[in-house]
Image (cartoon, rainbow, N blue to C red):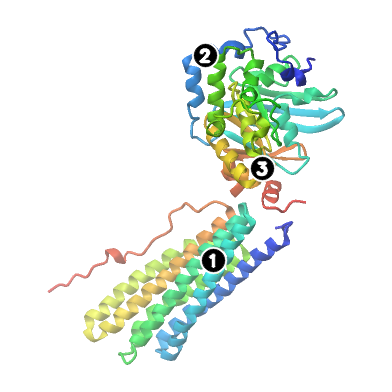
Amino acid sequence: MTEHILKAFDEDLREISSRLAEMGGIAERLVAESVDALVRRDTALAQRVIAADDAVDALQREIEEKSILTIARRQPMAVDLREIVSALRITNDLERVGDLAKNTAKRVLALDGEYHAQKQLRGVKHMADMVQQRLKQVLDAYGARDEERAMDVWRRDGEIDAMYTSLFRELLTYMMEDPRHITLCIHLLFAAKNIERIGDHATNIAETIYYLVVGEPLTEERPKLDTTSFTKVSLNG
Amino acid sequence: MAPVQNSLKTIDPGFRVPLGDLTMDDLTVQDSLANRPPEADALITKPAPQDEQVADAPLRADVRDLNFYYAEKQALNRVNFPIVDRKVTALIGPSGCGKSTLLRCFNRMHDLYPGNRYEGEIRLFPEDINIVSRDVDPMYVRLRIGMVFQKPNPFPKSVYENVAAGLWVRGVRRKSIVDERVELALQRSALWDEVKDRLRESAYGLSGGQQQRLCIARALAPDPEIILLDEPTSALDPIATSKIEELISVLGETVTIVIVTHNMQQAARISNFTAFMHLGVMAEYGPTEKIFTNPSEKRTLDYITGRFG
């Protein structure tokens, strides 16, 4: 895209975009570290994740203020307006991603001293790897304004949902097997839910990228394979 | 051709509009104000359909393959676009793109100078006549299509006389009717409350914004088919501008308005349809919403986002 007659406007947009990239990088790292802390039961790392979430929140406020100021000052139109509206939306999603990583890290602290079984963690770790990869892909797609790569993330959100559903069943089985696993499994289940939600935010970002590039909101129904709301346990006496 | 530019100054009881080839039957405005059927008044206040789609919307005018030449120089090149009935259509574009030239074709302003030449059509509905045709008297066109300019230009007369002028020119003389139409026009231009006690005072005593609304009232009084506004707020302060914009938004539900503006936010705020002109051609036309959020043409995008040139 050619530059604006008003150079300062380009500068404003570049600034917002680069702040957002920075925020994306931190959010990505927090997700990776929170899962790492959970798997290794590393409370020190978990503490760092909790503390680092403040940086994400601060960046969100900064991007929001800058965006509002740019709208007030430049009255952006068309693609410029979409650029700023998209930044506002993505920054909200990333802020939530940071919160969810922080919540997972808090659970690591709660589990301190609890029974530590690798078996139950495997599924959560696998799901977390997938979500991290999606988050990375969607942030790359934002950087490159590549709606095709964003849509790839969007289409595959169903896989994460399906994985969460099967994890839900699996953890349920462990809890039924041995009540001593309940505390661990409940925390893992919430951690898994956090991770699944991070996947949803990656999907939101993908929709925003589509809107940013194409100019029209995505109206298709997103693929949903999370059926845990309907899952129930039948106890046969 | 009749020296129309002077016609308003020479109002006298014997004044009659030069009709050219038209008969009195064609020129129904002449008497219709006195004997308006009730339906006609109903039409004034009836809002237009809310539908934003051009395809189904009733048209007030349609520009078809319009070329315009200032002597040898071609200023408009095969312009095509519709004017939707009782909606606001904004013409935007960089200086010299032809938007004012296009606007002036609608009331044959260019006829005031020799050598200017129109080709193609501007069809006015429901009559379905080509108003830029040589066979149509420019005076006839101006009686039906009113215009308001960049700088307020009231006559050096009283507020009342300014608004009544358009009616007198059309031969409406009965005082009760003129009074009624003047009040209605001033109310529709949101000026009545401010001037009702000073109708006999000079229009020059009004503020710039009031003068501009007075000019809009003057254009409205004879109930024109289209009102043309050529940058009506560029000489006004932000408050007066807001009042005019509010007025245009309200009027746009009952009158067909075509407005030229350099202020893109203004076009985005008050128009239903936007036409982007560039180098004498119609680069893009569509619902305002679309033009300002997601235009199809690269040059429209460059212009509205401030990347031009």
Numbered circle sitting on residue B236? 3
In this rendering, the label closer to the viewer, 2 or 3: 3
For residue A64, the mark is 1
Q: Which chain carries label 1?
A: A
| Residue at image location 30% in from the left, 90% down from the top | A115
Judge left or right: residue B146 versus residue B95: left
Quarter holding the N terminus of chain B? top right
* Residue at the limit of the structure toward the right, as seen here: B72
**Between tags 3 and 1, which lies in front?**
3
Answer above or below: position of A161 versus A107: above
Residue found farthest to the left = A237
Q: Which residue is drawn at 74% across and 19% down?
A: B9
Measured as percent of width and height from the top left, residue B67 is found at: 77, 28
Write down the chain letter for disc 2. B
Q: In which quarter of the image is residue A63?
A: bottom right
Closer to the camera in the image, A212 or B240: B240
- Mark 2, residue position: B36
Q: Residues within 10 Å of mark 2 (few under 14, many from 20)?
A: few
Classify 10 Å Cα crowding around label 1: few (below 14), some (14-19), many (20 and above): many
Query: Which dot, 1 or 2, sits closer to the camera?
Result: 2
Residue B165 is labelled as: none
* Vertical placement of residue B102 versus A37, above or below: above
Give the amino acid type for the residue marked by disc 2 in the picture. Answer: Arg
Residue at the far bottom: name it. A113
